[in-house]
Image (cartoon, helix red, strand yellow):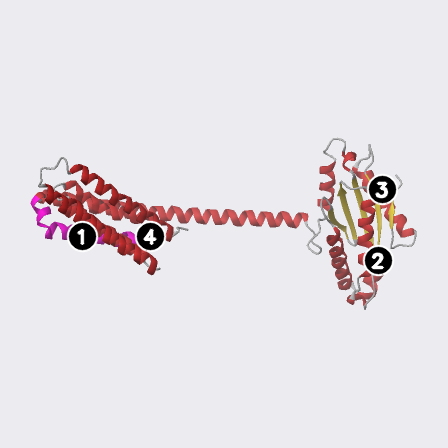
């Protein structure tokens, strides 16, 4: 998207520079002209410069007041400035080429309507200057007029064609970019679906094992203080049988929320399957990890479940630390075995594997 205000500002800054260059160039030319000094100073330097400055001042004021169609006002003002220069430099037939300048400048706005307006204003101004300026008529032959008119018309058709093709290319590029962005977004969403459990927004079974696999790619992973905990909702079958599967699903979601609330740093929480969850932690001691799992357990036990008629839910957990020489399967099995030890010991507790 074109920043129209910034572009107009840049164009006006450029026009101010052109006015300065005009004054400098004509002042230097003063030492080489054959015209009378006072006449050259008045007609070539002072009066035209004042006219250009007045035009620019009006446009600067309009820029502060007018918010809409300012680009059209700039193109018209630019064409008037060209008329001032052409009628001043009437001895230089090549100055007539300046009428293509507003047309060329309008291309920067990428606006076909503005381009057509600029072309129309440039042609009318060229015809008007050629018809009503005696000085221009005196120094321009009919053949010069015909050639210049043909050049302006040809340039106008060329710029119109270029802009049409440019707009088509831009639209094609925008459409392709949009389609690519939508595809990337869709791929990210699909990738998320394959890695995230939609009910709990924890990582899923697959992600859990991929994360463990990535840990075992390091040399001596046991030096990273890796711990795994497997957590299971106690008596979950009874919850489903007594209150229904919808209530059971709600319990799973709320348990997952308590787990997520306690995760931090390098913790990796996942829904391993059904009512079972798993957490991988890196960089903390066994005592610290035990406290974290206990915090999760006690927080869950404190939650009142309206779906269960105000009753509470408990979980049991098992913890295994990654020991030297231990493989991924043994790491998970140790945590799972500790979980079942907690279950057999009365549930609602956390057990640490002795392996």
Between 341 and 187, the one nearer to me in the picture: 341
Give the residue displayed 68% in from the left and 50% down from the top. Answer: 196
For marks 4 and 1, the one nearer the N-term is: 4
User: Which residue in the structure is indicated by mark 3?
Assistant: 334
Q: CA distance from mark 3 to mark 1?
A: 90 Å
The answer to whether 119 appears left or right of 67 in the picture is: left
User: Which residue in the structure is indicated by mark 1?
Assistant: 125
Q: Magenta segment, which residues?
A: 109-138
Q: Write down the quadrant of residue 33 in the picture.
A: top left
- Residue 178, given in percent of the width and then of the height, sits at 48, 49
Q: CA distance from mark 4 to mark 3?
A: 70 Å
For marks 2 and 1, the one nearer the N-term is: 1
- Residue 343, given in percent of the width and then of the height, sits at 89, 52
How crowded pointer 1 is (Cα within 10 Å; few <14, some 14-19, many 20+) is rated as some
Q: CA distance from mark 4 to mark 2?
A: 67 Å
The answer to whether 179 appears left or right of 195 in the picture is: left
Q: Quadrant of the C terminus?
A: top right
For marks 3 and 1, the one nearer the N-term is: 1
The answer to whether 139 appears left or right of 193 in the picture is: left
Toward the right, the furthest residue is 345
How crowded pointer 2 is (Cα within 10 Å; few <14, some 14-19, many 20+) is rated as many
Give yes or no for residue 129 being in the magenta stretch. yes
Between 321 and 41, the one nearer to me in the picture: 41
User: Which residue in the structure is indicated by mark 2?
Assistant: 314
> Residue 251, labelled with which disc?
none
How crowded pointer 3 is (Cα within 10 Å; few <14, some 14-19, many 20+) is rated as many
The answer to whether 236 appears left or right of 51 in the picture is: right
Toward the front, the furthest residue is 38
User: Which residue in the structure is indicated by mark 4?
Assistant: 111
Q: Under tag 1, what secondary structure?
A: helix
How crowded pointer 4 is (Cα within 10 Å; few <14, some 14-19, many 20+) is rated as some
């Amino acid at each position: 998207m074109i920043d129209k205000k910034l572009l107009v500002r840049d164009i006006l800054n450029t026009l101010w520079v052109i006015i300065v260059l005009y004054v400098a160039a004509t002042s230097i030319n003063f030492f080489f002209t054959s015209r009378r000094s006072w006449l050259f100073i008045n007609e070539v330097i002072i009066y035209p410069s004042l006219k250009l400055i007045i035009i620019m001042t009006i446009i600067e004021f309009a820029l502060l007041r007018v918010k809409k169609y300012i680009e059209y006002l700039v193109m018209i003002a630019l064409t008037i400035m060209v008329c001032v220069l052409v009628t001043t430099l009437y001895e230089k037939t090549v100055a007539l080429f300046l009428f293509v300048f507003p047309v060329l400048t309008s291309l920067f706005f990428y606006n076909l309507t503005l381009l057509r307006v600029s072309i129309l204003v440039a042609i009318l101004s060229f015809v008007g200057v050629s018809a009503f300026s005696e000085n221009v008529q005196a120094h321009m032959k009919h053949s010069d007029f015909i050639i210049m008119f043909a050049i302006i018309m040809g340039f106008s058709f060329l710029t119109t064609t270029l802009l049409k093709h440019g707009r088509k290319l831009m639209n094609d590029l925008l459409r392709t970019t949009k389609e690519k962005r939508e595809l990337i977004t869709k791929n990210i969403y699909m990738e998320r679906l394959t890695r995230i459990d939609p009910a709990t927004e924890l990582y899923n079974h697959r992600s859990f094992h991929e994360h463990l696999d990535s840990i075992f790619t390091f040399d001596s992973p046991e030096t990273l203080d890796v711990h795994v905990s497997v957590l299971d909702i106690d008596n979950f079958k009874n919850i489903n049988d007594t209150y229904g599967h919808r209530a059971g699903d709600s319990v799973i979601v709320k348990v997952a929320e308590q787990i997520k609330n306690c995760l931090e740093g390098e913790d990796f929480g996942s829904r391993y399957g059904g009512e079972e969850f798993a957490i991988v932690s890196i960089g903390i001691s066994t005592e610290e990890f035990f406290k974290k799992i206990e915090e999760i357990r006690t927080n869950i036990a404190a939650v009142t479940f309206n779906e269960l008629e105000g009753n509470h839910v408990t979980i049991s957990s098992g913890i295994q630390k990654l020991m030297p020489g231990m493989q991924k399967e043994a790491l998970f099995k140790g945590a799972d075995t500790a979980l079942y030890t907690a279950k057999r010991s009365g549930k609602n507790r956390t057990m640490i594997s002795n392996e």
